[in-house]
Image (tube, rainbow, N blue to C red):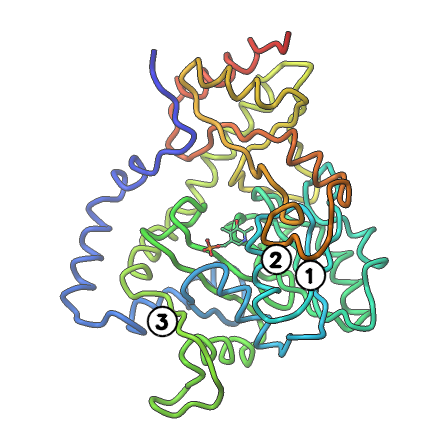
């Protein structure tokens, strides 16, 4: 029996090994390791890809979120609206500024923040909204921007799972006032370590984030503010430049796998994700929902198939946020997703036999 891992990053490297090895070798030989030519070139290439005027590389996705909020002068006493259903980093970025998170429930059909519930969460202390394009499916951005603009709020897209996704005809990363990106290895565009970026049409914001990530300094040894150290390494930028050229073709392979799952999985007890007509998702994760999630996970394991849960515990039920006093039942839609979600194997280089095996195993699953 062949094994089907949840995720395998090795074949991706094999496809581009020669080019990556050359880029790494050149980078090391050139002797610039921080803030060098590859970082500058990647920033230009990635802002072009996202159709924005500016981009700045930072150390990781959490910093991309955190530094952007800081650059908007968000801090203690302020509120930031976040999805109740997200990876905890979205919340942590807010907490790091000293501001308060105000969670809003998702639309169960997109898993993303429900625009219809945002108005009720706005108070005089609200400063920003962070929609997350969770699992690679864009959040419903037009109504979100309308609410934000009419209430004077900033919108920061958490695009960490959605490199290359589109909302109607526009790429994610260009839809809010700014967007935060992660290049964690397993993301659709991943470095070989930690990395991140912020994109925006507001080039002053980009320069403020750059300064905040560079000790609060835009001129060597002159510090205008108390900043941080969070920069995109030159080596990672060199690698990301090679990978960015392939991103669309890799996303295309993900879409083909998702299409096969959607048309060939037939099991009444499992509900499949469906893209909205205005969305072109990039399937960072392929989420299915079912009551007996843990039994399906075990069943797949017996068949040699890996799977993951995104995520087992929602942020408000984590020990880290116990002090907020948001008990079980506070966000029932989010809790329902966390209790019933299972992610099927998904990576560009999954071969036909692996996809066949997943479909067969899911179709043969019964919970009795
Ligand atoms: C991965 C991720 C982050 C954090 O990115 P890091 O680079 O790991 O810090 C933030 N938000 C979401 C939705 C993510 O998936």
Q: Nearer the viewer, mark 1 or mark 3?
A: 1
Residue lying at 57% horizontally and 63% vertically, measured from the top left: 93
Q: Distance between the residues labelled 3 and 2?
A: 29 Å
> How many residues crowd mark 3 within 10 Å: few (<14), some (14–19), many (20+)?
some
> Which residue is tagged 2?
91
Reading the chain from its start, which is encountered first: label 1 or label 2?
Answer: 2
Residue lying at 38% horizontally and 69% vertically, measured from the top left: 231
Viewer-nearest residue: 31 or 257: 31
The residue lying furthest to the left in this view is: 29
- Picture coordinates of residue 134 (x, y %)? 60, 46
> Which residue is tagged 1?
101
Label 2, secondary structure: give it.
Answer: helix
Does the numbered disc 1 mark a residue whose Cβ is under 8 Å from ligand 1?
no
> How many residues crowd mark 2 within 10 Å: few (<14), some (14–19), many (20+)?
many
> Which residue is tagged 3?
40
- Picture coordinates of residue 41 (x, y %)? 35, 68
Circles 1, 2 touching at the beta carbon (< 8 Å): yes
Reading the chain from its start, which is encountered first: label 3 or label 2?
Answer: 3
Circles 1, 3 touching at the beta carbon (< 8 Å): no
- Picture coordinates of residue 230 (x, y %)? 41, 70
Reading the chain from its start, which is encountered first: label 1 or label 3?
Answer: 3
Residue lying at 38% horizontally and 89% vertically, measured from the top left: 219
Q: How far apart are marks 1 and 3 (CA)?
A: 33 Å
Residue lying at 70% horizontally and 55% vertically, measured from the top left: 141
Q: Which of marks 3 and 2 is in front?
A: 2
Label 1, secondary structure: give it.
Answer: strand
Viewer-nearest residue: 111 or 326: 326
Q: What number is the disc on residue 1?
A: none
């Amino acid at each position: 029996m062949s094994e089907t891992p949840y995720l395998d990053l090795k074949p991706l490297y094999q496809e581009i090994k020669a080019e990556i090895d050359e880029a790494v070798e050149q980078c090391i030989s050139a002797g610039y390791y921080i803030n060098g030519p590859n970082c500058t070139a990647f920033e230009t290439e990635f802002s072009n890809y996202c159709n924005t005027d500016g981009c700045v590389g930072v150390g990781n996705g959490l910093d991309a979120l955190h530094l952007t909020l800081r650059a908007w002068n968000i801090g203690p006493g302020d509120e930031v609206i976040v999805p109740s259903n997200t990876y905890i980093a979205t919340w942590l970025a807010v907490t790091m500024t000293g501001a308060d998170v105000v969670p809003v429930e998702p639309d169960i059909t997109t898993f993303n923040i429900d625009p219809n519930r945002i108005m009720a969460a706005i108070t005089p202390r609200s400063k920003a909204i962070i929609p997350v394009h969770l699992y690679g499916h864009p959040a419903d951005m037009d109504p979100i921007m309308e609410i934000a603009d009419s209430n004077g709020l900033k919108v920061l897209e958490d695009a960490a799972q959605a490199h290359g996704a589109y909302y109607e005809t526009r790429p994610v990363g260009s839809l809010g006032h700014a967007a935060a990106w992660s290049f964690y290895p397993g993301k659709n565009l991943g470095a070989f370590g930690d990395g991140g970026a912020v994109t925006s049409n507001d080039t002053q914001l980009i320069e403020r984030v750059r300064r905040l990530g560079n000790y609060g300094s835009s001129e060597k040894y002159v510090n205008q503010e108390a900043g941080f150290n969070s920069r995109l390494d030159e080596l990672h930028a060199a690698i990301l430049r090679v990978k960015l050229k392939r991103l669309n073709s890799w996303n295309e392979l993900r879409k083909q796998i998702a299409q096969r799952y959607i048309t060939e999985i037939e099991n009444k007890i499992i509900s499949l994700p469906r893209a909205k007509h205005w969305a072109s998702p990039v399937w960072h994760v392929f989420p299915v929902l079912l009551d007996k999630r843990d039994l399906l996970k075990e069943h797949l394991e017996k068949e040699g198939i890996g799977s993951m849960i995104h995520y087992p515990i929602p942020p408000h039920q984590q020990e880290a946020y116990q002090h907020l006093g948001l008990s079980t039942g506070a966000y029932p839609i989010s809790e329902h997703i966390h209790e019933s979600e299972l992610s099927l194997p998904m990576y560009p280089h999954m071969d036909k036999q692996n996809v066949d095996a997943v479909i067969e195993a899911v179709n043969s699953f019964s919970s009795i």
